Amino acid sequence: MLRSTYLPLAAMVSLAGGASAMAADLPVYVKARPTATVPLWTGFYAGAHLGYGWGNNQFFDNFPTPDGELDANAAVRGGLMGFQGGYNRQFNRLVLGVEGDFSWTGVRGNFPCFQFGDQVCSAKPEWLGSLAGRLGVAYGPALFYVKGGAAWTHDHYTNLATCAGAQPRRRGGIPALCGDLFAGDQTRPGWLFAVGVEYLFAPNWSAKLEYDYMDFGSRSVPFFDGGSGFFTEDIRQKMHVIKAGVNYHFDWGPNAGVPAHSGGYGGAGKPLNVDAAGRVLAFSGFDVSKSSYSGYAGTMISPFADLDTSGLRYYMLGDAGAYKYSAGGRSIRGTYESGDVLAGYGFEGNYYSINLLAGLNAANHTLSAIDPENRVQGTVIGAKVRADAWVNPTPRTLTYGEAEYSTAFRTYYARAKLGYDLTNRTGIFVGPELVALGDERFNHWRFGAHLTQMKFGWFQFDLSAGYAHDSIVGNGAYGTVEVSTHF
């Protein structure tokens, strides 16, 4: 593992004291320079948040003729989690920036709708996203800001005529199809206004509290029953969100995340440990197999020391992809988005690296058609655990393993690799790998070969490919490309 040495603080104080003593004999008078305000907020940042959302959905009749009759006026509410990232530029106390965020939500509502057939509807914003400008005023380590820009949501609606009560079964020539489930999905744009406060509580780290108002206007939503049944409904939607989050400010600029003085955080400052291993590992990859593909990006952060030192770890991952399978004689296409926010401890030694992590996972699956047999639909937020271990038994051998499990759709993933350095001790390992993954819908395993730790400049590339068996789509092949760097 990489290790670094740097000049002890006591030595720097001694050198500075010696220079002051020599200068004290010189009869020179120098006018004090004005104290410059260090721009605490300038630079890139990324983080995660938890929150609570509530809103209103109004259903207006527009089928077969748009008469504008109110069919439902319902509330939705629930928790959410997600990521945010952006860039700030500070000019004295003024801070300008741009920020994007994405949230998986458990916001939902079930309510009576229409006035015939004893119908029940549901509304669920499965995710929320925004891209907005920020304008803030800084007071020491605190930032007060407003935010405005574009917003998006993906909604899932259902309608079911229960015919369980005394309501008529027909109205205006339109029958209630008793027991027939209709569903509609729509991604719609809107606008966002937000206010918030953010506070730098430690070097490179800030906490935030924010209120968002989102208006998605009125859109016509088509409903289908998987057969010939079809109708539309005009739906107006507004959302309110309160969220609390944590951001990590990257040292990609001369002053990014550096305090003007240690007292600004209410405690003594610590010199930044500059090490070749860095404090941030950033990684991404792309995976393809029979009838599916996915991409992912994430980071592992060591907040108080370099990654080659045992200590606290923060882990964030975003994952998205698409898949296809057959059900009931139909081809169904699914898309998904998933995110992890984990924390834990890393154990580092000369020949090993072990991380144990736990936290939250959110996943959303959207299907192109109704499939009542598939339980992996919609958005679920669950608990997640993860462990990984990298061991070099000898300088030319590698043993690697990782495993994780989430209660969201009972999703699991495990991978094991053995490697041998066939080169002249350059650290490029070749060998076999075994992978198992799945959820409540499918089980999948792989056996293949890998090429690990090819380095080109700042970046490391890992490749793997081989045979795959899927319980839904059968046998096939797979391939994975991963790239990582640290800073």
Image: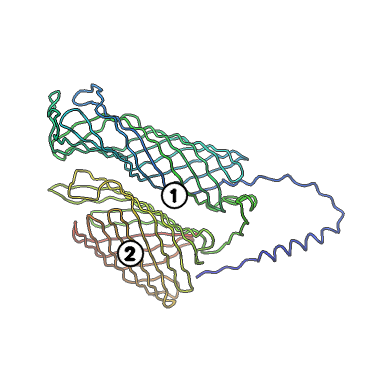
| Callout in the foreground (2, 1) | 1
Counting residues from the N terminus, which is met first, the one under dot 2 or under dot 1? 1
Residue type of the residue flagged with mark 1? Ala
Residue farthest to the right, as pictured: 27
Q: Is residue 461 left or right of residue 250?
A: left
- Report which residue position mark 1 lands on: 48
Q: From the top left corner, tell me how far across and down residue 329 is, in percent.
A: 12, 48
Query: Which numbered disc covers residue 464?
Result: 2
For the residues labelled 2 and 1, the Cα–Cα distance comes to: 30 Å
Q: Is residue 297 visible?
A: no
Q: Is residue 156 visible?
A: yes
Q: How many marks?
A: 2
- Does residue 137 lie above or below 172 as drawn? below
Query: Which numbered disc covers residue 259?
Result: none
- Does residue 253 lie above or below 270 as drawn? above
Q: Is residue 220 left or right of residue 241?
A: left
Q: Nearer the viewer, residue 151 or 379?
A: 379
